[in-house]
């Protein structure tokens, strides 16, 4: 049976777990544990394996929501996770020291997957740190010669996350229209 | 003056008060604005606040001035403003009041952010959207105010389907895409409306790095270019009504763009009236458009979209995400977009109006001939459609 899934990725503390929680139909399965390495300064608990949530669709279809571990030492799992995925949601924490470095890192890390599918980028913590602005992120993406959706996102707000995921779907196929 | 870390925050060091008073003042300032930070002298404050009634305050004053002449000095006293202090300073009379503090903080912000005051506003870069007059005046150069809530900036987007959008925007005409006369009639000139005045004033304000006020014989509208905010003492309902009124035909001479004089505005009394500039312009543009397109955009020429609008902070017009995705794939004319997506052109027009207000669109010459066969409609994917419905239903549930 084909597993339909959307992958949520991004650095530690960007809000992947929260974003999955805000649109999942089940209470997400969390695999957080006490942080003991370089993540300790940013979060008391961090995702060491992956997060999992589900969206149940009519006719029994399911969309599985997977959050990648934020730490790079788990990047061996990313290829496995993305296999057969619909697309990628990249969450970036604007309050981190160098969010553009994160942007470039994750865009490069998931390059093949993005080329096969698409990506939508949500920038969190903009209320804590207003710069770089969304415009700056677009300028940074222009350097990579790509034009992905980039939105300011509050991962706790299901509407923000929903719009981000919708933009991913339309990027894959602008022809979808729903039942409005 | 050194570059400040955060333009919204203002760091104040309080000198010459007992510990208990210091604590009380910290609480007091925090209640006024979270952007006022009380810090220690070692934390490079922007402002030195000194209670001159305190024993030994004169020594503190002399020391602070000698070591940190670049900081703004605020003197606090029970007595009237002393004339024995030779330094430039701002004055706060005790007992301290909220209004008094706000006034002083605003003045501090002015000093921190403003380059030397210009007496005249020179011509701004030409805007095609407006003909409002810019009047010179010698007043405050205005910063962003720290005294306002953050809620407006994190307000989530509203997402509309066609039915809901009619309620939001008012009656919108249906346009027959195959009737050139109807298409031609669906154009509007932003310069005839408040939109044009605001757009032009924002251009001027950014160019001059100066806060400006648009006076269009309505409510004063203030533009704060440093913080990308608009201040307007009017409800959305009132704005929607005024946005659709032509103003240039009847009162062009009355539309003025003036420097902001903080003393004469009600900004301090209504700090909840600030709105994010981008969200405001977008909203104003779609209320002005009402399904029409700006005359600067040729409906038959391909439109290039610079990048995705920040949809989580904007009113999402019907089909806006689809239109954006299509235009990001390839520039197309507004009419071709409507045909490809099989939607009413009025929805493309209203969306492009918003994008134009945010400088997100440009036009290029058509690359293919008009005789070329119409584009194939894009085939929908069943699974993605179902997921889209699910996400939209979730949004409706959450807002119900």
Image (cartoon, coloured by chain):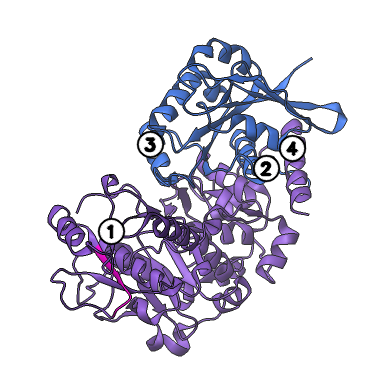
Percent from the top left, x then y, of residue B128?
36, 68
* Figure check: B38 above or below B283: above
Q: Which chain is purple?
A: B
Q: What's the residue at 58%, 26% (across, down)?
A: A117
Can you tell which of label 2 and label 1 is closer to the viewer?
1
Mark closer to the observer (3, 1): 1
Tell me the crowding category of disc 3: few under 14, some 14 to 19, or many 20 or more residues within 10 angstroms, Cα based.
Answer: some
- In the rendered view, does A169 fall on the left or right side of B330? right
Q: Which mark is residue B47?
A: 1
| Left or right: residue B20 compared with residue A6 | left
Q: Do badges 3 and 2 share one subunit?
A: yes
Quarter of the image containing the N terminus of chain B?
bottom left
Instruction: Give the labeled residue for mark 3.
Output: A140
Q: Chain of mark 4?
A: B
The residue beneath circle 2 is: A158
**Residue B216 versus residue B202 in the image, above or below:** below
C-alpha separation, residue under disc 3 versus residue under disc 2: 27 Å
x then y, percent, for residue A180:
77, 50
Marks 2/1 same chain: no
Whole-number angstrom distance, CA of label 3 to CA of label 1:
36 Å
């Amino acid at each position: 049976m084909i597993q339909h899934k959307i992958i949520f990725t991004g650095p530690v503390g960007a809000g992947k777990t929260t974003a999955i929680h805000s649109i999942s139909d089940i209470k997400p399965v969390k695999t957080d544990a006490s942080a003991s390495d370089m993540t300790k300064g940013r979060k008391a608990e961090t995702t060491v394996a992956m997060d999992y949530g589900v969206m149940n669709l009519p006719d029994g279809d399911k969309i599985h929501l997977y959050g990648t571990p934020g730490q790079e030492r788990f990047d061996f799992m990313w290829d496995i996770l993305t296999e057969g995925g619909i697309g990628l949601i990249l969450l970036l924490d604007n309050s981190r020291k160098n969010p553009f470095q994160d942007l470039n890192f994750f865009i490069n890390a998931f390059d093949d997957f993005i080329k096969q599918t698409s990506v939508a980028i949500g920038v969190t913590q903009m209320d804590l740190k207003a710069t770089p602005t969304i415009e700056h992120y677009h300028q940074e993406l222009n350097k990579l010669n790509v034009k992905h959706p980039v939105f300011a996102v509050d991962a706790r707000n299901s509407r923000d996350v929903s719009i981000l995921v919708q933009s991913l779907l339309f990027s894959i196929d602008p022809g979808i229209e729903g039942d409005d | 003056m050194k570059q400040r870390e955060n333009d919204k925050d203002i760091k104040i060091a309080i000198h010459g008060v007992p510990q208990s008073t210091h604590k009380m003042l910290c609480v007091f300032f925090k209640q006024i604005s979270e952007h006022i930070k009380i810090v220690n002298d070692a934390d490079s404050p922007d402002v030195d606040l000194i209670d001159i009634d305190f024993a030994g305050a004169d020594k503190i004053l002399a020391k602070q001035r000698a070591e940190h002449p670049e900081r703004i000095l605020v003197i606090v006293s029970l007595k009237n403003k002393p004339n024995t202090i030779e330094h430039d300073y701002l004055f706060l009379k005790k007992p301290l009041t909220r209004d008094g503090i706000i006034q002083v903080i605003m003045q501090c912000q002015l000093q921190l952010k403003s380059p030397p005051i210009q007496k005249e506003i020179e011509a701004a870069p030409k805007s095609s959207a407006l003909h409002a007059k810019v009047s010179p005046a010698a007043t405050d150069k205005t910063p962003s105010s720290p005294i306002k809530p953050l809620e407006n900036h994190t307000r989530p987007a509203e997402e509309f389907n066609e039915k809901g959008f009619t309620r939001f925007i008012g009656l919108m005409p249906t346009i027959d895409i195959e009737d050139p006369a109807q298409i031609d009639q669906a154009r509007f000139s932003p310069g005839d409306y408040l939109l044009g005045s605001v757009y032009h004033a924002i251009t001027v304000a950014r160019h001059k790095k100066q806060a400006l006020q648009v006076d269009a014989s309505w409510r004063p509208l203030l533009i704060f270019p440093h913080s990308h905010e608009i201040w307007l003492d009017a409800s959305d309902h009132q704005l929607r009504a005024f946005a659709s009124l032509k103003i240039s035909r009847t009162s062009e001479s009355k539309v003025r763009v003036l420097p902001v004089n903080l003393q004469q505005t009600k900004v301090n009394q209504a700090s909840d009236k600030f709105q994010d500039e981008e969200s405001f312009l977008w909203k104003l543009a779609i209320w002005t458009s009402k399904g029409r397109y700006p005359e600067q955009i040729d409906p038959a020429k391909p439109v290039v979209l610079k990048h995705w609008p920040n949809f989580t902070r904007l009113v999402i017009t019907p089909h806006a995400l689809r239109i954006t995705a299509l235009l990001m794939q390839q520039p197309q004319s507004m009419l071709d977009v409507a045909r490809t997506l099989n939607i009413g052109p009025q929805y493309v027009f209203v969306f492009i109006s918003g994008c134009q207000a945010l400088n997100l669109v440009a036009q290029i010459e058509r690359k293919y001939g008009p005789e070329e066969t119409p584009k194939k409609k894009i085939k929908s994917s069943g699974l993605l459609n179902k997921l889209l419905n699910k996400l939209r239903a979730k949004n409706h549930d959450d807002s119900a």
